[in-house]
Amino acid sequence: QVQLVESGGGLVQPGGSLRLSCAASVSIFSINTMGWYRQAPGKQRELVATISPGGSADYADSVKGRFTISRDNAKNSVYLQMSSLKPDDTAVYYCNAYVWVRGRWSDYWGQGTQVTVSS
């Protein structure tokens, strides 16, 4: 089974920074794209950023220039460095991985980590 374990959320003031981490617990599975999504209260889950195995990254327009996604393939981990945080960034952040397991590609999700931006 594949598990994604997130860490790094918390309370930060506007303009501050946080770094989220996500480690995938896998054995012989292959991981393709990894990414971060977020869901604010009363809103749908939305894409924040994704990164390919080769390091090609895509970002939501709302976070471009402020957030940076990276990954360590040797550790099956993905990170999200968040800077210049705004109250609108407040949400539960979910790690996602597209994994080859049991003969097919499937999406896996972490349990979520709360990020609150408030003074």
Image: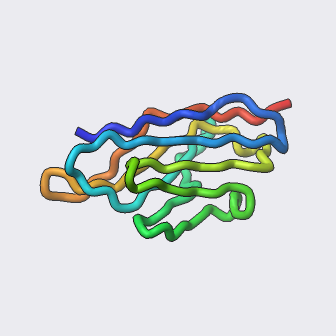
Taking 92 as reference, is 68 above or below it?
below
| Residue furthest front in the image | 74
Q: Position of residue 86 (x, y in %)?
A: 79, 45
Residue under the image location 72 percent in, 29 percent down: 11
Q: Position of residue 60 (x, y in %)?
A: 62, 62
Q: Is residue 56 left or right of residue 87?
A: left
Residue 13, quarter of the rendered image = top right
Q: Position of residue 38 (x, y in %)?
A: 57, 45
Count of marks, rendered view:
0
The chosen color scheme is rainbow
Image quadrant in which the N terminus is located: top left
Q: Is residue 77 left or right of residue 20?
A: left
Residue under the image location 27 percent in, 43 percent down: 26
Residue under the image location 34 percent in, 61 percent down: 32
Residue under the image location 54 percent in, 67 percent down: 57
Taking 41 as reference, is 70 above or below it?
below
Q: Is residue 105 left or right of residue 7?
A: left
Residue 14, quarter of the rendered image = top right
Image quadrant in which the C terminus is located: top right
